[in-house]
Amino acid sequence: MAAIYISCRYSEASGKAQLLGDALRKRGANSTYLDPHARWDRQRDSGAVIRHLNDADLVVVLATKGYGRALRGRFGSKEELELMKKMEKHYMLIKCCEDLVEEGVKELEFRQPDAPEWLLGEPGEPQLPGGLVDLVEGRLAEAQGKTGDDGDEQEDDDDDDE
């Protein structure tokens, strides 16, 4: 089963992470995230983050203004982002604020200029933007098509004999 890790390290986006995760699971995807409202010591556990990243075919980054900021003495979103890049994980950025400020997240935005927005502070309960689940599923399909079981890029199997 495909695994999607929703990276949501700040509580202001946790409702969105839960809503997106629920919608993806209804469609058969194995999606997970670390709930920022749960015990903080468990959320800062690098082992849990590493396991989620390792198991994920796709990382969905719910980028708030503070995402990617270093936390003194803790394994925070900056370290998570660096590890995601080092592991060369496929990702999808979802902007939860208009202006991303941390360099690591700005780099993701540069590499994905068509990143959808799902801004914080919208009145009422969070609602999934139309088509967002389809976008995530499309990125997941791309991620699965680009890597084999060993993580190496696959060759195009078209028979283009010259």
Image (tube, rainbow, N blue to C red):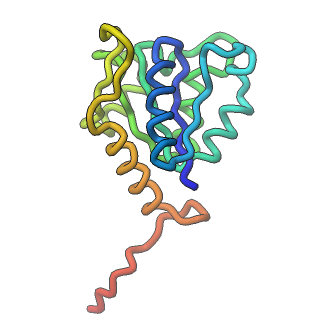
State the quadrant of the C terminus. Answer: bottom left
Image point (49%, 21%), residue name: 68
The residue lying furthest to the bottom in this view is: 162
Image spot of residue 130 (x, y percent): 26, 34
Image spot of residue 74 (x, y percent): 68, 16
Give the number of callouts. 0
Image spot of residue 129 (x, y percent): 29, 29
Of 13 and 19, nearer the camera is 19
Of 119 and 54, nearer the camera is 119
Compared to residue 129, the image places residue 76 above or below, namely above
Q: Quadrant of residue 98?
A: top left
Q: Is residue 148 left or right of residue 49?
A: left
State the quadrant of the N terminus. Answer: bottom right
Image point (55%, 32%), residue name: 82
Of 26 and 36, nearer the camera is 26
The residue lying furthest to the front in this view is: 26
Q: Quadrant of residue 156?
A: bottom left
Image point (38%, 33%), residue name: 93
Compared to residue 138, the image places residue 73 above or below, namely above
Image point (43%, 50%), residue name: 140
Image spot of residue 26 (x, y percent): 48, 42
